[in-house]
Image (cartoon, rainbow, N blue to C red):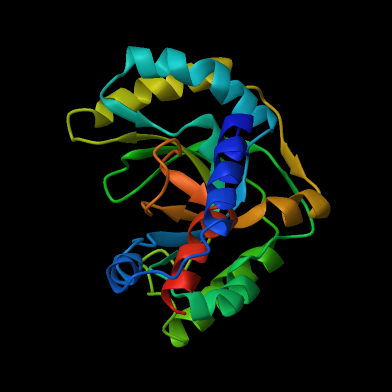
Amino acid sequence: MITFLRKFTLSVFLVFLSALQFPLSSETREEYRSLPDKGSIASLISIHDTFISTFWEKHHPILEKAYPTLQFIRPEELHITLMAIGPWEWDHLDTLKKYALVYPKEINSPLVIYYMGKNKEWLTLELEKVPQEWAKRVMHNKKHLVALSLTKAATFDHEFRPHISLVKATSSQSINLLSEVESYLREHFPKENVQLSENELKMRTVFWLASPERPSTYANYIPLDEWLEIYRPLYERASE
């Protein structure tokens, strides 16, 4: 998911870390302890490299230019949210992986345009046909994590509506513009089912971080595994 340049930058960074043979000063250790804000974690199914992201790569620049007051999700960040966990701790990762990375045996569903949010400020593509066993498991596992105090209950936990967020109106003045984007999608978006096999879903079901400390080249979200590659060595050295 990351470009060659990002991979190269990451490799150079990790080589630099491994070359640090001298002991860290107390000042440096303190800096490392206060280092990364780990951000908020969410489990999701990435929709990158599908017909949906291909469409969005072509059309979202057109829409972004036409509606600069709206906030558009980048093509590489398109996803189906499973659970918004929030702040997280290192010691809880194994438990979170067990209960939050939940995917069905397959997805084969039409997509329908759907407005979400308290003020209907999000324009999304909702999966029309959802395996009920999967939906029940997501809600059950979320309740379990709430009981373990690893996340907080949310107002929408009583219902699982898998969807792909595309555009957000960031002010009351721009909400009316969403209907124009909707009209554009109805005219141009391909009438195809989103189809993902169990193996594809297994690879695509991951944790992403929102608003963590990260290299400036990264977008708003960063896959957890990539973030751990960069920052976990710093945490481990600080705890030595």
Tell me residue 221's x, y (percent).
Answer: 45, 46
For this rendering, which residue is in front, 92 or 66?
Answer: 92
Question: Residue at the location (38% across, 19% down)?
Answer: 64
Question: Residue at the location (68% across, 28% down)?
Answer: 51
Single out the residue that lies furthest toward the bottom. Answer: 148
Question: Residue at the location (72% across, 35% down)?
Answer: 193
- Asked if residue 19 shows in the view, the reply is yes
User: Where 176 falls versus 31 (above or below)?
Assistant: above
Quadrant for the N terminus, please. top right
Single out the residue that lies furthest toward the front. Answer: 22
Tell me residue 184's x, y (percent).
Answer: 47, 17
Q: Which of the 4 image quarters holds residue 56?
A: top right
Q: Is residue 210 left or right of residue 195?
A: left
Q: In this view, does 214 lie to the left or right of 110?
A: left
User: Where 1 falls versus 117 (above or below)?
Assistant: above
Tell me residue 12's x, y (percent).
Answer: 57, 42
Q: Which of the 4 image quarters holds residue 216?
A: top left
Tell me residue 81's x, y (percent).
Answer: 52, 54
Q: Which of the 4 image quarters holds residue 6?
A: top right
- Asked if residue 162 shows in the view, the reply is no
Q: In this view, does 115 lie to the left or right of 46?
A: left
User: Where 190 falls versus 207 (above or below)?
Assistant: above
For this rendering, which residue is in front, 77 or 141?
Answer: 77
